[in-house]
Amino acid sequence: MPKRLDQIIVVDIESTCWEGSPPPGEVSEIIEVGICPVELSTGRRLGKRSILVCPKRSHVSAFCTQLTTLTLEQVNGGITFMEACEVLQREYKSRERVWASFGDYDRTMFQKQCQATGVPYPFGPRHINVKTLFAISRGLPQEIGTAEAMGLMNVSFEGTHHRGDDDAWNVARILGVLVQRLRA
């Protein structure tokens, strides 16, 4: 399959979570996929999208709602994990394009959930860890969070932290600046 180097697909997921350990029989699973493509020639963000995913092996806790603002009713109205993966492939050509996330959590959650559910992994082998790339580009001794990285760039976070589409939008801003610096 040919590589498309016109965009990088920035992805940020939100998952079911609890203040402590998951309740017996439940596991953390993806409940939102936030997407924001970045145009490589300009570093421009091409819009953002939130795909709500109905959990099958867990429930949205009060802690999860407090953190993400997502409610049980909202995610129960979402699509299946398989359908979300199909949207990534069909509408964003996720197997053909490079994709990025802030850290490895999103990548490993997709891998774990695909393996556990038998859903084909929706991405190709090329992943960019923006968290690591930012730290390297700034000569930092360790990785930092999204808000701190944006502070170092003198830009404000837009939207609600821990919502997939807003987090993807902000990570895409960081990545767009880094890509443009590389091209200069």
Image (spheres, rainbow, N blue to C red):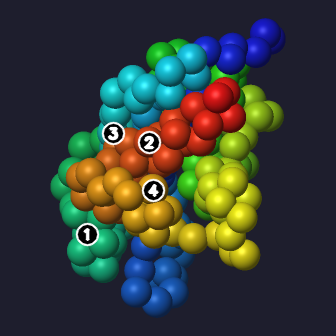
Is residue 117 in view from this perspective? no
- Disc 1: CA contacts within 10 A as few (<14), some (14-19) or many (>=20): some
Mark 3 → mark 1, Cα distance in angstroms: 16 Å
Mark 4 → mark 1, Cα distance in angstroms: 30 Å
Mark 2 lies on residue? 173
**Which callout, 2 or 1, points to the residue nearer the camera?**
2
Q: Residue at x 57, y 71 (%)?
A: 144
Q: Is residue 62 left or right of residue 83?
A: left
Q: Which mark is residue 50?
A: 3
- In front here: 159 or 154? 154
Report the amino acid beneath label 4: Met
Q: Residue at x 24, y 74 (%)?
A: 66
Sooner in the amino-acid sequence: mark 2 or mark 3:
3
Mark 4 lies on residue? 153
Mark 2 → mark 4, Cα distance in angstroms: 10 Å
- In front here: 136 or 56? 136
Mark 3 → mark 4, Cα distance in angstroms: 25 Å
Q: Position of residue 40 (x, y in %)?
A: 58, 22
Mark 1 lies on residue? 65
- Tags 3 and 4 in contact by the CB under 8 Å rule? no
Report the amino acid beneath label 1: Thr
Q: Position of residue 146 (x, y in %)?
A: 47, 62
